Amino acid sequence: MKASDRNKLLGRRIRELRKERGLTQEQLSEKVGKTDEVISNIETGAASTRLSTLFDIADALKVSLLDIFDWVTPRKLTADEIRQEELVSRVRKILRSEIAASAEDLAEINTALVRAKQKKSR
């Protein structure tokens, strides 16, 4: 990902957090000790900013620095991955004795393990 794309994503996230808190760019700039223009440039992705400024913005918005970088969209799971997660959850419950293992459960788990082994050996 290019730096300009990261700047735009970061700027959108800061704008989103600012608006959620009902602040204008002017109000945020006063709290951070920067000009309106600096805040505008950050929010539009037109400019990079120092880490210290991001800390100041996070403080002004009453969020953590991690919250500011929470603009990464998680990858959507495929149907196979969702099914695998469900199977793993069932295996854990069986191992913890939260549920009894039925013959169907064991057959399905075995089939999934065989498929996974076949994919790995390709």
Image: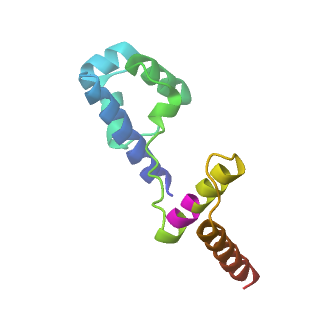
The answer to whether residue 52 is above or below residue 16 is above
Where the C terminus falls, by quadrant? bottom right
Residue at image position (60%, 56%) is 90
- In this rendering, the count of numbered labels is 0
Magenta-highlighted residues: 82-86
Residue 59 drawn in magenta: no
Image position, residue 5 (x, y; %)? 43, 53
6 sits left or right of 115 in the view: left
Confirm whether residue 19 shows in the render. yes
Q: How is the rendered protein coloured?
A: rainbow
Image position, residue 51 (x, y; %)? 55, 29
27 sits left or right of 120 in the view: left
**Residue 100 picture quarter:** bottom right
**Residue 98 picture quarter:** top right
* Front in this rendered view, residue 93 or 72: 93
Q: Main secondary structure of the magenta part?
A: helix
**Residue occupying the far right of the picture:** 121
Residue at image position (61%, 72%) is 108
Residue at image position (51%, 23%) is 55
The answer to whether residue 35 is above or below residue 114 is above
* Front in this rendered view, residue 62 or 2: 62
**Residue occupying the far bottom of the picture:** 122
Image position, residue 27 (x, y; %)? 27, 17
Confirm whether residue 33 shows in the render. no
* Front in this rendered view, residue 50 or 108: 108
**Residue 37 picture quarter:** top left
Residue at image position (51%, 28%) is 65
The answer to whether residue 10 is above or below residue 93 is above
Residue 85 drawn in magenta: yes
Image position, residue 2 (x, y; %)? 49, 56
